[in-house]
Amino acid sequence: MYNIFNFNLQNLKQWMKENKESEFRAKQVFGWIYKNIWDFEEMNNVPKSTREKLKKSFYIEIPSVARMYKSELDGTTKFLYKYRDGNIIESVVMKYKHGNSICVSTQIGCRMGCKFCASTLGGIVRNLSSGEILAQVLKSQEQIGERISNIVLMGSGEPLDNYENVMEFLDLVKAEYGLNIGQRHITLSTCGIVPKIKELADKGLQITLAISLHAPNDDLRKSMMPIAYKYSIDELMEGCKYYIEKTNRRITFEYALVNGVNDTKECSKQLIQLLKGMLCHVNLIPVNEVKEREFKKSSSDNIKNFHDILVDNGVETTIRREMGADIDAACGQLRRSYLKSKNDLKGV
Ligand code: SAH
């Protein structure tokens, strides 16, 4: 049995052909599943005999809502979704003036080991398939009753550590028969797997690349992110410049400010040195405190100072607005507390 969401139109046409069905049936089926009809029985323009064959070969995997939290402050909604194998992930929907944006997870858990992140505390369980990532968007659209027009790959997991599936997901996102969302409305965030950044650059997509930099020098970055042992900041910057050269897209550097660690004046100077003149933008994030970790958030004065120094020196910088502050929980924390409450920390 296959999850139908892992198929693209061409794959399903091929399947129809192999099963002695007309190829145009594939488009009809896609017409339904992308419009929240997740039962073959309800696809009334598809003949019964075809539906029977489909049911024998496919399941339609839409996760169930294990928990949902809605912010009273800004309408941000966090969903804990459960897949058919029982695994739990989280997705967040944010409402902006320009439309709804979703933050999707790309893996169950994560193996990158960043010191400040809750998603990685239990290591990785498995990759999500393209269809499983897609279903987060479809289910969320159904739940909020509105279209989602922006996608950020910034939930749990490292997208470039699940490269093939994430690329297939991006194809389904942009397909006219699929979500039909333009590439400029998609942001992929990575801790910096340099060879994959280059591979992505060669695809020439117009998506926004966000790099989780968090430190302006190798020693400090190593103390926060194990990936820094594998790729130096110089190598990372070379990868970023290659991406810009190939796509002409502005890169976002994410920098989570941790009190007394990476928010010093010296750090701001080094960061300016590193980024000055580059087609980029820095997004300062007040770090979310994670129960299991020791670090603390920078004070709002420090954050503002850090911001001003960068801007005064010609580095475009914004401070990320904290969304859904009342529903709490940094990346991966909801999933952990859910599993703990179920007394099941297997693989977490
Ligand atoms: N693995 C990818 C995407 C998932 S993490 C990446 O590393 O970019 C999404 C973003 O949230 C990253 O910038 C990550 O560094 C950041 N992040 C993780 N834990 C955080 C925390 N406790 N506070 C603030 N940002 C955090």
Image: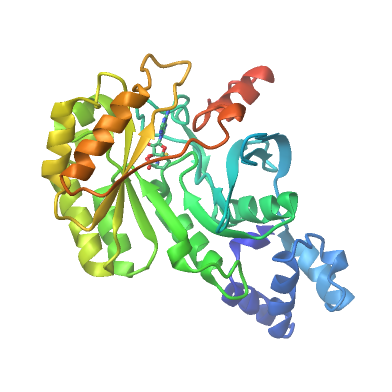
Quadrant containing ligand 1: top left
Residue 73 placement, left or right of 64: left
From the top left corner, tell me how far across and down residue 167 is, in percent.
44, 61
Residue 154 placement, left or right of 197: right
Residue 35 placement, left or right of 241: right
- Residue 37 against residue 271 in the figure, above or below: below
Q: Quick check: can you spot residue 310?
A: yes
Q: Which of 331 and 311 is in front in this view?
A: 311
Q: Quick check: can you spot residue 115?
A: no
From the top left corner, tell me how far across and down residue 311 is, in percent.
23, 44
- Residue 102 against residue 334 in the figure, above or below: below
Q: Which of 300 and 169 is in front in this view?
A: 300
Color encoding of the figure: rainbow
Q: Which of 60 and 255 is in front in this view?
A: 255
- Quarter residue 247 falls in: bottom left
Q: How many marks?
A: 0
- Residue 17 against residue 274 in the figure, above or below: below
Q: Nearer the viewer, residue 127 or 152?
A: 152
From the top left corner, tell me how far across and down residue 215 is, in percent.
23, 33
- Residue 238 against residue 12 in the figure, above or below: above
- Quarter residue 347 falls in: top right
Q: Which residue is drawn at 10% across and 42% down?
A: 273
From the top left corner, tell me how far across and down residue 340 is, in percent.
62, 18
- Quarter residue 297 falls in: top left
The quarter of the picture where the N terminus appears is bottom right
Q: Which residue is drawn at 79% across and 70% down?
A: 53
